[in-house]
Image (tube, helix red, strand yellow):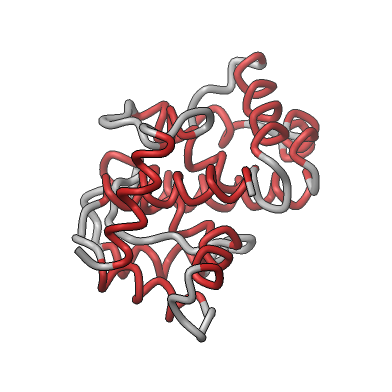
Amino acid sequence: MNIFEKLYKELKKKYGRPQGQWNLWCKRPKTEEEREEVAMGAILTQRTNWKNAELALSNLKKAKIHFFKDVYKLNIKKLATLIRPSGFYQAKANYLFYLIEFIVKNQGNLEKMRKANQGELREQLLKLKGIGPETADSILLYALDKPIFVIDEYTRRLVKKQNLAKNFSYPFLQKLFEKNLKKDYCLYQDFHALIIIDGKKH
């Protein structure tokens, strides 16, 4: 067992199954509506905490906006008002619209998108305004069940604390985790979620 597998086992023993936001994000299998909620959540949680993103999602649900197709029909101003609690809401309304437009026009829905090639999908997502590597990979991993490891500040902190690497760039750390773990989206989802849960406690 290598150090990465050991860390995962330790976190799993300490926290069990990831809770809170992760009840949905690590849920398997997910319905189409749940997948869409996760994809929207990946944008809404940018530069804010999950509570604010959740308030924005709750506003959408109250307005009977449950699916991508509902958001797609919305006026951008109306969308911005609904997601206001997430902060940077005008920019995020545009980012959400670009993402949903891309999915609806090119893939149809997330279920179909899941069958597409991971590398190609990632490249396409990264071309969309407002989507960087962390958001793209969160969508791939949690909404589409693709085995790709997400790197964020909590992961970097863990790497520093455990002295696992000297290079903290996104591509390097992603390769490092993927090389040392079994290629399994369930494992990647749970491990990444547990790193964040642990990171927030310290």
Q: Is residue 79 left or right of residue 61?
A: right
Residue placed most toward the observer, 13 or 186: 13
Q: Position of residue 168 (x, y in %)?
A: 53, 79
Quadrant in the picture for residue 122 = bottom left
Q: Is residue 52 left or right of residue 157?
A: right
Query: Is residue 179 positioned above or below 95 on the image?
Result: below
Q: Position of residue 145 (x, y in %)?
A: 29, 46
Q: Position of residue 56 (x, y in %)?
A: 69, 30
Residue in the image at 36% along x and 48% along y: 10
User: What is the total number of numbered labels drawn onto the structure image?
Assistant: 0
Residue in the image at 28% along x and 63% along y: 118
Residue in the image at 47% along x and 59% along y: 136
Quadrant in the picture for residue 45 = top right
- Of the 4 image quadrants, the one containing the N terminus is bottom left
Q: Position of residue 140 (x, y in %)?
A: 38, 53
Q: Is residue 44 left or right of residue 81?
A: left
Question: In the image as oriented, which residue stretches furthest toward the bottom?
Answer: 166
Residue in the image at 43% along x and 29% along y: 24
Q: Is residue 86 left or right of residue 29?
A: right
